[in-house]
Image (tube, helix red, strand yellow):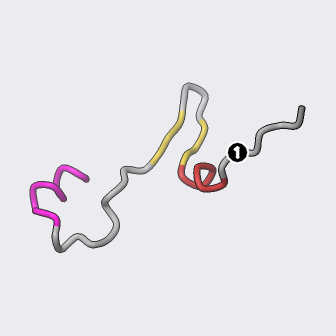
Amino acid sequence: MPKMKSKSGATKRFKKTATGFKHKQSFTSHILTKKSPKRKRQLR
């Protein structure tokens, strides 16, 4: 049976480490005007 292809979108978003995976917090990059200051602060 052939190997499974990894999803290329996931390949770009996650980084494999020895103990697990690293990823960036989502919802922080754009359309920030409609998000409240509290929400933006908590997304840092």
Residue that appears at 60% across and 55% down:
9
Q: Position of residue 39 (x, y in %)?
A: 15, 55
Please state, as top left, top right, bottom left or bottom right, where the N terminus lies in the image: top right
Q: Residue furthest front?
A: 1
**Image: 33 above or below 43:** below
Residue that appears at 53% across and 36% down:
21
Residue that appears at 27% across and 72% down:
31
Q: Position of residue 26 (x, y in %)?
A: 36, 54
Is 26 covered by the magenta stretch? no
Q: Position of residue 10 (x, y in %)?
A: 58, 49
Q: Is residue 19 left or right of 23 when viewed as pictured?
A: right
**Image: 23 above or below 20:** below
User: Which segment did they paint magenta?
Assistant: 35-44
| SS of the residue under disc 1 | loop
Magenta stretch prevailing secondary structure: helix
In the image, what residue type sits under mark 1? Ser
Residue pointed to by mark 1: 6
